[in-house]
Image (cartoon, grey):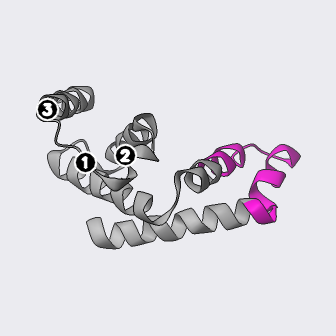
Amino acid sequence: MVLTEVLRVIFALTALTGSVTVSWGATYPTVAIVDYVYGCMKANGETRAALENCSCSIDIIASIVPYERYEAAETFRSLGLQTGERGVLFRESAPAKSATTELRRAQAEADVRCF
């Protein structure tokens, strides 16, 4: 089953059952959650086990890092990929280092608990 079909089934079941009641639901937008799980599954295989592990991973990250900090860290990481002087600010500044370190720690905790 391809990843998009898996995600469609998940959302359909969720909509039908209405069973998603998690504490981070109000703070992490659905798009951010799906984006994380999609990228995680691409990196770890498009299997049911990967789906469960990746879903667990974002749950752990969301319980550790507030969405605003997660968003900042992802922005710094993304913009830090630029080469030369353009990316230096997003890689080397104190706020960038702080945000990315916090996210890496949360991801490490999620890896330990979920994978």
Q: Which residue is depicted at the point 62% across and 54% down?
A: 73
Q: Nearer the viewer, mark 3 or mark 1?
A: 1
Which part of the image, by quadrant, shows the C terminus?
bottom left
Q: Secondary structure at mark 3?
A: helix
Q: Which residue is mark 1?
A: 21
Give residue 109's quadrant in the image: bottom left
Report the predominant secondary structure element of the magenta stretch.
helix
> What's the distance in space between the residues labelled 1 and 2, CA to CA?
7 Å
Confirm whether the magenta stretch covers residue 75.
yes
Across and down, in percent, residue 54 comes to 30, 52
- The magenta region covers 74-95
Q: Is residue 64 left or right of residue 6?
A: right
Across and down, in percent, residue 31 comes to 43, 34
Q: Which residue is depicted at the point 82% across and 53% down?
A: 88
Mark 3 or mark 2: which comes first in sequence? 3
Q: Sort mark 2 into few (<14), some (14-19) or many (20+) by Cα contacts within 10 Å.
A: few
In the rendered image, the vertical position of residue 62 relative to residue 115, given as above or below: above
